[in-house]
Image (cartoon, grey):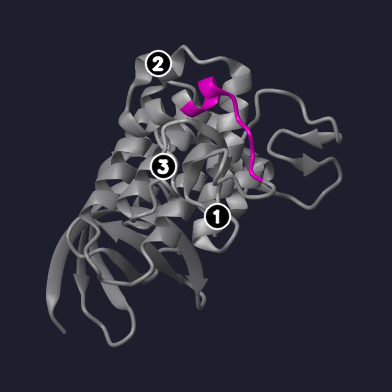
């Protein structure tokens, strides 16, 4: 087996056997990698805590037939330590990890720009300078752009006209009156301006936006993302909203009495007495 080293962000983990875990990592040079971390669920594991979602790590791996084997781990930035104490940022970060996993379909296909976007998004979340949902929407738009799915926001996606009237997901963004398909959304001009600001990284304009425009923007961005992925982002249902849900749900869209979801997982992560093996 050949040995290689890379840095990456842990996207997710899953149990394997009695003591091992499969770790999915988006790496800087190799792309998405799945590796086995042997014995990490044991109490005396040398690096189990370093291989949790959100961790930015330096890895050494042996190439295996189907799964590589993780032999060394060093923590570079433990983003999870800061995010786990803040539920809105924790859920936004979880949605980022899931999106990065979905957008990097093939394993060991270099995805440097997606890696850099994810690291930048997690760092911005941890710094806390902007609302968590704004950071998440900016990440969604930019990661879509890197994947080749950037929405048209300044001129009609179909004919190039500047007089835009609506936002049509199937058309690829804003459309003019003549090209507007049935069922297209009609967002305010301020909402489209917010989407442009997030895509460009204009945080001064984004931070000055109104709550109603942020809510409308989030709905459009989430729908556009999931249409292109052809699957829903499960963690999006748990992302904190600014206003209370009129249907009697807890933050994140989970009804009272529903089965445990992201908030329960988050709360259990705060309790040192709850086993996470």
- Residue 271 visible in the displayed image: no
Q: Position of residue 121 (x, y in %)?
A: 36, 37
19 shown above or below 140: below
Name the residue tied to disc 1. 170
Count of marks, rendered view: 3
Q: Quadrant of the N terminus?
A: bottom left
At label 2, counting other C-alpha atoms closer than 10 Å, the crowd grade (few under 14, some 14-19, many 20 or more) is few
Element type where label 2 sits in the image: helix
Q: Residue at x 39, y 53 (%)?
A: 149
Alpha carbons under labels 2 and 3: distance apart: 19 Å
Label 3 to label 1, Cα distance in Å? 12 Å
Q: Earlier in the sequence, mark 2 or mark 3?
A: 3
According to the image, label 3 marks what residue? 152
Q: Which residues are magenta?
A: 184-192
Judging by the rendered image, the residue that carries numbered circle 2 is 205
Under circle 3, the secondary element is loop
């Amino acid at each position: 087996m050949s040995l290689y080293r890379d840095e990456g962000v842990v996207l997710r983990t899953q149990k394997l056997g009695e003591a091992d875990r499969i770790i999915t990592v988006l790496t800087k040079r190799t792309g998405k990698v799945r590796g086995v971390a042997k014995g990490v669920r044991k109490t005396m594991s040398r690096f189990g805590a370093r291989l949790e979602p959100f961790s930015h790590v330096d890895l050494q791996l042996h190439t295996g037939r189907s799964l590589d084997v993780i032999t060394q781990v060093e923590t570079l930035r433990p983003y999870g330590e800061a995010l786990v104490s803040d539920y809105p940022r924790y859920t936004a970060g979880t949605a980022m990890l899931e999106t990065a996993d979905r957008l990097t379909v093939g394993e060991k296909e270099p995805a440097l720009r997606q890696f850099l976007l994810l690291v930048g998004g997690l760092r911005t979340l941890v710094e806390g300078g902007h609302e968590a949902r704004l950071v998440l929407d900016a990440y969604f738009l930019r990661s879509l752009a890197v994947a080749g799915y950037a929405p048209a926001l300044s001129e009609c996606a179909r004919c190039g006209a500047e007089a835009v009237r609506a936002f049509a997901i199937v058309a690829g963004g804003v459309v003019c009156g003549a090209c507007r398909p049935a069922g297209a959304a009609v967002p305010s001009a301020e909402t489209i301006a917010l989407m442009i600001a997030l895509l460009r990284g204009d945080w001064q304009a984004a931070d000055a936006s109104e709550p109603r425009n942020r809510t409308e923007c989030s709905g459009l961005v989430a729908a556009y993302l999931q249409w292109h992925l052809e699957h829903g982002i499960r963690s999006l249902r748990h992302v904190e909203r600014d206003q209370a849900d009129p249907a009697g749900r807890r933050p994140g869209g989970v009804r009272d009495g529903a089965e445990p979801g992201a908030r329960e997982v988050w709360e259990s992560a705060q309790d040192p007495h709850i086993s996470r093996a």
